[in-house]
Amino acid sequence: MRIIQISSRFPYPPDDGGRIGLWNITRQLRELGHDVWLVTFAEKQTTAEHIQFLKQTVTRLTVLPPQRYSLLQYLISTVHPVPIHVRKRSTPEILQVARKIGQQAAEWDCIHVDRSGMIAMGLEVSGISKKPIAVRMHNVEWVIWQRFAQQFPFWHPARWYLQRQARLLRKWEKHLLSQVDLIIPITEPDGRRIAEEFGIEKPIVVIPAGVDPEYWKPVDGEQKRTDVVLVANFEWKPNIEGVEWFVQKVLPLLPSTITFHIAGKESDRALRHLRGIPNVRIYGYLEDARQFYGRALFTFVPLLSGGGIRIKILEAMAMELPVVTTTVGAEGIEAGEQQGVFRCDDPYRFAQAIQDLLSNPEWVKKLGKAARQRVLEKYTWRTLVQQMADAYQRYLGPFAK
C-alpha cells in the first residue's frame, strides 16, 4: 500500500518511547514493502543529518516547522473551548499545509495519523483527497490528563487547569474519533474506553507497542548483574512524579545499603534535587542503554499517571530483566509475575518486591528469561506492524484506489 503517515513528532533519533514507536512503524512499513509519505514536525533537537537520514528511509518526506507555544497561548487555553492538545496541531497554517497534501494524494491509498491531536490535520487531508484515515492511539489522552490532575492537591491551580483540559479532551476525542475509518489503540483498556465510554462503532483493532529483539537482547559475557536500575525520559512529567513518589514513600522502607541507579534524557536536570540522597545515583542521558541494563539484576518503574504502553519496560524485559512497577506502569502489557512483571501500587508492596528479588538472584534469572520469551511471543515490531498493515488492507482496502 501507499500510506501517508502524519506524525505528531519527528521520529528520529528514536530516543524516547514516543519516537521509538513512530520510527519503528515507519521503518517496518518500508521493510515490508509499503510506500510511506512521512509528514512530521521538526523539533528543537532535529538536525539536517536527521532530516537527510529520513529522506533516504521513506518514499517522500514533508517536514513542518517546530510548533512552539508561548505563555500567552497557555493562558488562552485556560478559557478556550478547544483543548490545547488538539488546538496546537490544528492551527490555520497547519490545516493549510494539510489541504496542499490532500491535493497531491491522488496516488496514495490511505492516511495514518499518530495520536488524537493529529486527527484534525488528517481529516483535512482526507477531506480533500477522499482517502480513508486510520489513527493510532498511543493513549486515550483525556485519561492521562485526568490522572495527572489527581496528583495535585484539591486547591492547586494545576489541578483545575488539567481537569478542565481533560473534560474538553474527552468531548473532542469522541468527536474526532467518530470521523475516522479505523482506530488502533495500543492497549485493551484504551480500546474498551473508546468503544464503551465514547460509544464509537468504527473498527477498533488493538495493536500494542513493541521492541526489536535483535537489538534489545542480553549482553554477552559474564558481567555480574547486581544493580537495580531505571531508564526513562524525564522530559515527561509522570516519570519525574513517579521517582519522587518512590523516593518519598518507598525508599524509606528499604535498607540504605541498596543503591538505585537512574538514567535517561534530562534526568540530570529534572532530578538534580535528589543528588544528595546517598543511595540514589543519577547518570543523565545514555547514548546506548544496553550496557546500563547489562549490569542490572532488575529494573523498577514507579509510575502513577500516564497511559499507553511503557516501551522501556518491554526493552528491559527483552534484555531478561524483571520489572517492579505499578498498575499504571504495566498497563497494556500482558505479563504477570511469572513473566517477571510485578504490579505494586502500595509503597510497602513495592519495597517488598524489590527485597524479594534482591534476595534470590537465581529466581530473578529465571524470571528474566520468561520476560524475554513473553516479548518474543507478543511484542516484536515486525509482527505488530504486519498486523497494522493487515488491518489497513482489511478495513481501508475497499476504499483505496
Image (spheres, rainbow, N blue to C red):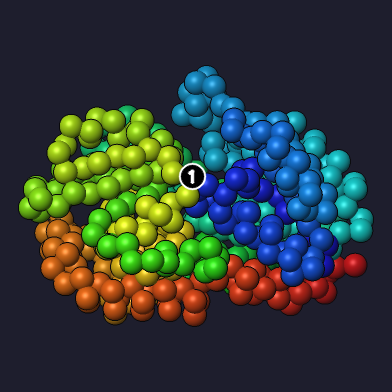
Kindly tell me whether residue 390 is visible in this rendering: yes
Q: Indicate left or right for 49 with 155 as reference.
A: right
Q: How many labels does the image show?
A: 1
Front-most of 53 and 76? 53
Mark 1 highlights which residue?
287
Q: In this view, does 284 lie to the left or right of 134?
A: left
63 vs 173: above or below: above
Which residue is at 85% across, 68% downward?
A: 400
The answer to which of 228 and 391 lies nearer the viewer is 228
Query: Residue 373 lies in what quarter of the image?
Result: bottom left
Residue occupying the point 88% across, 52% down? 105
Quarter of the view holding residue 158: top left
Along the horizontal axis of the image, is 215 left or right of 326?
A: right
Q: Is mark 1 on a helix, strand or loop?
A: loop
Amino acid on which disc 1 is placed: Glu
Looking at the image, is 281 positioned above or below residue 309?
above
- Nearer to the camera, 222 or 234: 222
CA neighbours of label 1 inside 10 A, class few (<14), some (14 to 19), many (20+): few
* Residue 195 percent location from the top left of the image: 53, 68
Against 363, residue 41 (above or below) is: above
